[in-house]
Image (cartoon, rainbow, N blue to C red):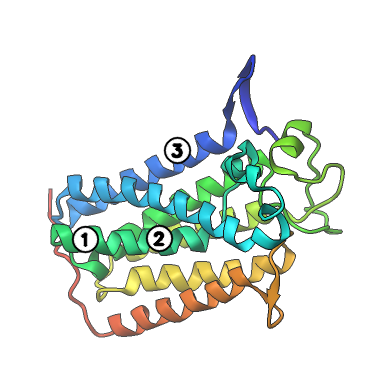
Amino acid sequence: MFPKLFQFGDFFLPAYGVLVALGVLAGLQLCTILAKRRGVDPEKISNLVVLCALAGLAGAKVAMILFDWESHYSKNIGDIFSISTLQAAGVFQGGLILAIVFAWWYMKKHGLPFLETADLLAPGIAIGHGIGRLGCFAAGCCWGGVCDRSWAVVFRSRDAADLTGVPLGIPLHPTQLYEAFAEFVIFGLLWQRAGWKLGPGAQIGFYLVTYSLVRFGVEFVRSHAQGLVGGLSLTQWMSLGFVALGAWYWHQSRGRNTPMVEQKG
């Protein structure tokens, strides 16, 4: 694809970084809109979104390094600080864990109710992650396994191969696009549900369940170096954990129609 939007000498503007930044900005805008509607301080929410995005990026990279430690990083320590590692999307679930922990601390510090605020953030997470996955596709990272379907994609950019290691000239599952499409659909459902009377935890629970099920399935056709535990990748086990957590939040929200009050005007 197009991992470099433009290059001047040794400097280049990475498509992945630009799309991730656009994803954060889109999520920030949506979260700010919902915060204003619900009478929540938009400055607190915007700060939370930015800081959680940074925590998420860091957590995703750390999880990727830990998961691929035996197969790659233990033998190539220097790659931890390489451009290819910086370009890689990392393990989203690892980023989500660190972002949730940081969000809990931030919300407690600033007096924001955890589940209600997490519900407010859910649509922004979905749209931001979806745009970020388009960045993965542009960069060539997080590629899929060999695919014989009509929708298979073939990467031919030498820059993409050098930066991320994606194999060239081989039909692959467009796993990045699978996730991006799913995230956009999930966002649409979350945005529609944002106007409903839902109990605390309904939105974030819905997001955790639906996205984690998607990621669980995509893992079967994604190429990665993770070892298998009980026939499943570590990411799949994490996804199942998030399904359970989301289902619990979702169940707890039933019959508790006490969302934040929306402000008119």
Task: Give the residue at x 30% y 65%.
Answer: 119
Residue lying at the far top of the rendered structure:
9
Q: What is the three-letter code of the residue carrying label 1?
A: Met
**Residue 92, labelled with which disc?**
none
Q: Which residue is mark 1?
A: 107
Q: What is the three-letter code of the residue carrying label 2?
A: Leu
Is any part of residue 225 visible from this angle?
yes
115 or 83: which is nearer to us? Answer: 83
Task: Give the residue at x 43% y 67%.
Answer: 207
Q: Which residue is mark 2?
A: 98
Q: Which residue is mark 3?
A: 21
User: x and y percent of residue 44 in the render?
Assistant: 19, 49
Q: CA distance from mark 2 to mark 1?
A: 14 Å
**Quadrant assignment for the N terminus:** top right
> Left or right: where does residue 148 sit relative to residue 141?
right
* Structural crowding at the residue carrying mark 2, measured as other residues with C-alpha within 10 Å and reported as few (<14), some (14–19) or many (≥20): many
User: x and y percent of residue 205 in the render?
Assistant: 38, 73
Task: Give the residue at x 62% y 39%.
Answer: 82
Marks 3 & 1, CB-CB < 8 Å contact: no
* Structural crowding at the residue carrying mark 1, measured as other residues with C-alpha within 10 Å and reported as few (<14), some (14–19) or many (≥20): some
Q: CA distance from mark 3 to mark 1?
A: 23 Å
> Left or right: where does residue 167 sit relative to residue 116?
right
Judged from the image, the secondary structure of the residue bearing numbered disc 2 is helix
Judged from the image, the secondary structure of the residue bearing numbered disc 3 is helix
